[in-house]
Every structure is written in structure tokens, then in C-alpha cells.
Image: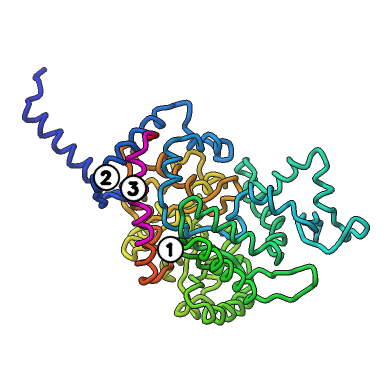
Amino acid sequence: MSSVSADYRQCYHHKRAIIVDKEHQHSLGGDIILTAAESRCNEKLLKAKYKELQDKSYQPWQKNFMHVRKDIEKSRVFQFIRKLPKGASLHSHLYASASYRYVTNDLLHRKHIYVCNIDGRTKLKFVAGDATNTPPNCELLDDKRKTPEFDDWLDAHLLVSDNPENAWDSLRKIFTFMYDLFSYVGVLEDYIYQVLLEHYTDNVYYVEVRTPFVPMYDLNGTDYTAEDFVETLWNTMKKFQRDHSDFIGMKIIYAPYRATTTNIVRKNLDILKRIAQKYPGFIAGIDFVGFEEEGTLLHYFDELTSFGEDFNFYFHAGETNLHGTHVDFNILDAILLDSKRIGHAYALPKHPEMMTLIKEKNIAIEVCPISNQVLGLVADLRNHPAAYLIARGYPIVICNDDPGNWGAEGLSYDWYLTFMAMTPEYTGLHFLKKLAINSLEYSALNETEKVTAFKIWNAKWNKFIESVIRSDIY
């Protein structure tokens, strides 16, 4: 057998190197050029990443997040990402955004909370009652707390089932269980403040939350309006900014349940338009939330096209493993309705024409990896379709969806699992920096606000790089 010539060998490896380099250039973050300081930081990051990838006893991306959260928190790469300035959180449902820790250690220890059976559904609710005057079909939470099975009962009502087959059903029951608790006037402001604080502590400086109009209440029977609800969010954001001068802000994406009637949606969009005039720039746009099989974007076609000039769209679409159904074709309607971003779009790689349109229109995909895993779309996050989008350089942002419902807090867990499970082992700081930039670039901030946001983020980014270089931890 003849030996391979040196020239052929050299030519082969040259071609191979060119292809590998092109793959890197085309991937998300491939256009980022690191400074000398960032390159030194990147060396430390990649060393830690490679070490964790080689540890076959670790591999948390293969397991349900709820079983490995504490293991992840010990990771050096996770600790690196937690300290990294991540920019913005763009896909968070308001009433699932604060941590389980906060809900159980603070909110559920307040007075007048009852466990009530309302129309066959278990709910937490503030009620004007006492030990001698318990409302019908209700039990004081503090009394239930004394029972030996309380902790297990509470977890079953606050955390998504770790059985993927039951996960969606348990998620819907959690929202039903907690909705009235969060809607209480005495809780809402504290809860919103905590949502912002947990993101800020996780080095996230701008937040967009999805929420419907919430019917607030108190123990005196006061009537509250949608305007009162939005005013509470606005005032709380302003208070948080006074306490944290480098916090960029918060915006609202109005997000009714997708089974809401068209008449109610039209009525609420009229209200939303009036509120947006009172709080310019605070309403980012419109979405519909909930199980996609229960309603399509086309169901609201007339309403959406009527208000399309007044509001931007940020639609959930294609959060499914199905193919060729109305659920994954929600992606197409989100594209044609000019959605600025698309939530999840898990089914997108099955639709090449839609992928072309996404690229042409520069529509960002809101990737929520832990949510997709916990809710049963993918078991091993290395198989998540976003890995393909990342490899092809599609515009994506990493989001947390409903972190409180599976024990997460902030954005870092989702960033970490994306970084470790969906990128090549040689991918480092280029990718993370691009994610942070994307989070601000594809946000609902206007151009003037973005200039301020990037100024704040750049200062924090440079300070972070310097701290990593000085540190001997990584």
C-alpha cells in the first residue's frame, strides 16, 4: 500500500481547518472579536468548561433540572456565568418569576391566607376571617402548616411535576393555585420588587414580563381596574430604580390566555391602548400564553391586525414536538404578523421556509431550555433544537420562562445549560458575550434607551473581565 504524500496530507488538513474555521464564524458569537483581556478570561473559562465536560459522573444536562439544580450550583462555570453581566431577561411570566424560596419563606407566612376549594379547584387566597369565623370551603394556611404532610403537599402545588407526562397539567394547576395570592394588593408590589431583585442579583439589569390584566383585590372589597394593576407595576419599577440606580428598567408584554374570547381581547386591547398613552414606552407589546393546542394566533387575526399599528408582537409559537399541525404552524403566523421575537419556536428546524424567513426578517428566538426539558419536549439538552440554531448563527436570546415553578432563580441556570449542552467544547466567551448583546439588541427598548443600556452593560462587562483575570478561582 502506497504511503500518503506529505503534500496531500498538508492539503487535506488545510481544507479541514478552513471548514472548522467557517463553522466557528457562522455560529452564534462567531463575529465577536475578543480583546486581549477577554482572551485571557476566555482561557480560564474554557479550561473550566473542558474539565466539567470530561467529568462523566456529572453531566446535569442529561437529567431533569429539578434533580440536579444543587449540583449545578457547585459548578465553577455556573459561578462564572452567575457573575457575568447578562443584560436582559426577555421572556418571563410575571407570576412564575420569583423564586420558590421567596414564596415559601416570605409570602406564605403572611396573615389571612386561606386554602380554599373554589369550583373544585384548590386556591390560596387572602380572606377576611379568623379562627372563629372561617370562610366556607376554606382552611387557614397556618393550620394546614401544622400537619405532617404539609411540606409534600406544598411542593406538589408549587413545583412542576418531575414526570414529563404530568408536567403541563401540574403547571396549569400551579397558576390556578397561586393566582389569587399574587393578585392581593398587599402582596403584588412586594412580589414585583422581588422579581426585579432576583434578576438584578443575577446580574440582569432589564426585564420584560408577560402578564394579563390581573384583577387585584383587598380585604375591604375595593374595586381595582386594569389601570390600577399597571400603575402598581410602574410604581414598583420606579421604586426599584431609585434603590438601584444602574437598573435599566422593566416593560410589560400584555399576555392574555389564548382561550380568551375575541370580544374580551378586543375590549382589553382598547384598555391597553389607553394605558400605553398614560405610560409611554412601558407597554412593550402583545402575546398570547398557555397551551398552544387550545388556541391559534389566527383565531385572533382580526383583533391583532386592527391593533398591529399600535403595539409590537412577541408571540409564543411552536412550543411543541408535533409536526404539520396548527401548533407548529403558529410559527408561520407569528412571522407573517411581524412578531419582533418568537417564544420557544421549538419546532422551527422542521420548517426550512420559516427558518429562511426568520433569518431574513431578523426575528429573535426566545429559547427557554429548562422549561422545554421540564415540560417534556426534550430529555437531554444536548438534543435541543436550539443547538442547530446556535451552530447556524440564528438570532437567539436565552430566557427563563417560569423559573419559580422548577426551583430556579434568575437567568444563570438557563445560560449555563445552553452553554454547556448546546455549544462545542471550544466555544467560550464569544458566545456568552453575544448572548448578552442580543438580549439588549432584541429587547423592546427604543434606540435611545438601548444607548443607555449598552453603556451600563459595557461598564459592568469590563469590570467583570478584570475581576476574572485577577481571580485565581477559575
| Circle 2: element type | helix
3 or 1: mark nearer the eye: 3
State whether the magenta stretch is mostly helix, strand or loop.
helix
Q: Is residue 391 left or right of residue 166?
A: left
Quadrant of residue 437 in the image? bottom left
Q: Is residue 230 visible?
A: yes
Identified by mark 2, the residue type is: Ala
Q: Name the residue tied to disc 1.
A: 341
Percent position (x, y) of residue 376?
56, 45
Q: Name the residue tied to disc 3.
A: 431
- Choose the circle earlier in sequence order: 2 or 1: 2
What span is in magenta? 455-472
When the figure is inspected, residue 452 is found, relative to residue 100, above or below; the finding is below
* Name of the residue lying farthest toward the top: 1
Name the residue nearer the viewer: 323 or 405.
405
- Choose the circle earlier in sequence order: 3 or 2: 2
Q: Name the residue tied to disc 2.
A: 37
Q: How is the image coloured?
A: rainbow
| Circle 1: element type | strand
3 or 2: mark nearer the eye: 2
